[in-house]
Each structure stands twice: as C-alpha cells, then as structure tokens.
Image (cartoon, helix red, strand yellow):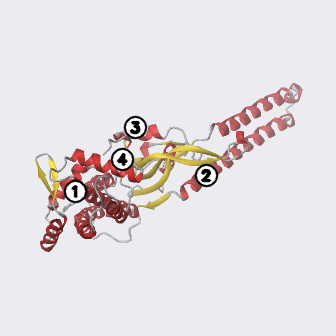
Amino acid sequence: MDTLSVPAHAREPYIPVRVTDLIDLILAEAGTPEFPPPPADDQAAFRQLASAVAARVHAGFRSTLQTLKDAYAPFDPDADTCGVRPITEGEQKGRLDDLFAVFSDVLTRAGFHRMTRAEVEQTMRGSSDWGVEMDLCWDVFERVDVFYRGKGVGLRTRRPWWRLFRTQEVIVPTFSRVVFILKQQPHRRLGPAADTDSVFLKLFKDIPQMDIEMLLPGTRLKMPRLERGKLGGSVLGSIGYVAYRLSEVQVAGLLTGSLLALYTPLALIFGYGYKTIASYQVARQTYLFQLAQSLYYQNLDTNAGVMYRLFDDAEEQVLRQALLAYYFLWRFAGPAGWTPGELDARIEADLERRLGAAVEVDAAAATARLERYGLVRKVGGRRLAVPVRQAIAVLESQAAVGPRPTGPRPAEPAAV
C-alpha cells in the first residue's frame, strides 16, 4: 500500500463513519487492491462478530457511565432528584475531581483534544466576520476545560461594503465540535445571582476558531474599532463644539450672574452625552443580538445531554477502532501478522483513500483491547487475528460466564 502523504500532526483521531456504515464499507470493498472482498459466509460471520464485540464494548463502558453519572449528580443544574444525605466538602471535591478526570478521558476516547489555556488565548485573538470580539476573564472559573475535534476550515458568505454588498465566499478556520466543562466561582462579572455550585457542560458545532470565547460566561463585549472610532469621534466633536460655544459667552454676562449665557453650551453637553450613550447602547444590543443569532443553530446540547451524547460517541469510536484492527489483521496480515505500526499505516491509508479523510488510528490500544477479549494473539512484536468463527465462539463463551473485570480505576471502563 502507498505511504501516507498527510503528516501525522494533521490527522484527526476520529473516524467519521457510523459503525453500521463502516461495516458495510469494509465488507463491500477490499482493503487493498490485491485482495478481493470476503465470501458471503465470511461477511455474515464478521457481522455476527461485530455484534458480539459491540455488546462487549457496551458492557465495559456501562461501568464508566455509572461513575460519570455519580460524579455529576451533585453538580447537575437540571437534576430533579434530591440527595438522601448531605455531601461533605471533601466528598464534593473528590467527586468534582472524578468528574473532570472521567469526562476528559471519555472525550479523549471520542477523538477530542483538550486545549491548554495558552492554546485558548492564542486561538481567540481577534474575531471572525461573523463573531463578536469578547474580553475573557479567567477568574470567573473555579475550574474549566475546553475541548475541540475536527480542526479544519469552512466556507462562509459575507457581503462587504467595498464589494457593493455582493456575496463573497470566505475560508474560515473552524472547529467541527467544541465542548466546555466548567464550574463558576463568585465574581463581579457574573453578578450576585450566578450559579457557582453547578458544573455546566456545553457542546457546539462548526465554531470559527477565533470566536471560541463567545461561548464562555463571564465575558465582556469589545466594541469593534469602527464603532469605537464613531463613538470617540462623537465625544471629541461634542467637547470641541462646547468649548467653541463657551468661548462665545460674553464675559459681561458671566459677571452679572446671568445663567442664560450658559444654557446653550450646557444643553449641548447633555444632548451630545445622551446621544453618545444611546448610540453605544444601540450598537451593544446589535452585537449581542448578533451573538445570540450566531449561536442559536450551533448549540448541540447542554449539561447531562452533553455527557450522554459524547459517551455514546466515545463508545462508538472505540468499537470502530476495534473492528478495523481485527478486520485488517484477519483479512490482510497473513500468518506472519503485523506490528501495531504497520496496522496503523494500512488502516489510515485505506480510510484516506476511500473517505478522503486523514484519520489517526490507535492500533496499539485497539489490539490491546482485542487481546483482552481473546480475539488477537501477540507473537513477539506482531499481532495475529484469531479466525472469525473461533473469535465468535470465544466471545459467546465469555458472555455465558460474564465479562472479566480488569480493575477499579474510575477512568478506565471496568470490562473494556
């Protein structure tokens, strides 16, 4: 197979195909040109094996989901259940640590990248033509993590005035998915009614990279330079005109104590002041409306809904990796087997050829999971797949006695 032409750092650790479609894809076409598709009976056997592997993966993830639900329960702002006993401060901190740790692990399995604070600050400099530049204060958060998946570009349309408002297509760097998990702390920016006890989860789609700070609480609107110039010009013009009018006031009128001589300049001061403030408020409301309108169609889920949605995403991603690893070892590796590096290269090149997507596959983790299931054998540094019908029998025998636990670590599915 040809060597990969896409650099590893440009690859996404996510396979953008549903499991059902992926099975159809790999069975309908050979993984390499020199291999024909498998016979019909082998295809049926592989589909049966895929169902058994899916059940095994789901059983393993179920324990992690329960851990995540228990950790999130005290912090869920939308919960309609009550606790049966008070939680101590130490227990609350421990559950908060578990929540952030397990949530981060789940998102990593789902192909997300956790951004550092430096990465967030570098990304959010400026704003796109469809966003609003905001000032972000990190002190409003007790804890916050930001994740993204699908770093790429998208096409947007705009109508700039210098093109006489004709439509123009612009390439914009985007994140396909953006996820936040955050807990607020008391701060003047949040106001006295802010919820500082709950943990909030948010999931967005197709967000311009420069506009990522628009999604966080505790931000302040930055007026665009044009609007700041207009307001500044209005203020300077007001001051200049008032100074000019004051210079026309007769000294005699002031000496006689006549306040009518100051009426015109004072009226100008208050009039232009009101106009300036009103202009700012109108511009501010316009940009806040633009912000709300921009995010209305990009908000995918909130709080517990984010947790369940991404958990399902992580489970499917693990299943996709496992099925691809087994299929390629079974069909193409031969009796000598492949190393994890060779398996990586074969799967990634094939997916790029057929999907046009640069995908990063973690063959080492996938084959380690298949070894625990008894579907792959390790011989030296190479991996060999158990024949498909034997693999089905192995999983059926395990299902009869129940899955084997692998340890109590909360961040690792107990049976995966």
Mark 1: which secondary structure? loop
Q: Which residue shows up at 57% across the image and 55% down it? A: 292
Compute the Cα span from label 3 to label 4.
Answer: 14 Å
Residue matched to label 4: 113
Mark 3: which secondary structure? helix
Name which residue type carries label 1.
Glu
- Locate the C terminus by quadrant: bottom left
Compute the Cα span from label 4 to label 2.
Answer: 28 Å
Left-right relation of 307 to 286: left
In the rendered image of this protein, does residue 220 appear above or below residue 76?
Answer: above
Compute the Cα span from label 1 to label 4.
Answer: 18 Å
Residue matched to label 1: 412
Compute the Cα span from label 1 to label 2.
Answer: 42 Å
* Mark 3 neighbour density, 10 Å: few (under 14) some (14–19) many (20 or more): few
From the image, state whether disc 3 or disc 4 is nearer to you: 4
Compute the Cα span from label 3 to label 1.
Answer: 28 Å
* Mark 2 neighbour density, 10 Å: few (under 14) some (14–19) many (20 or more): some
* Mark 4 neighbour density, 10 Å: few (under 14) some (14–19) many (20 or more): many
Q: Residue 334 placed where, x, y %?
A: 18, 53
Name which residue type carries label 3.
Ala
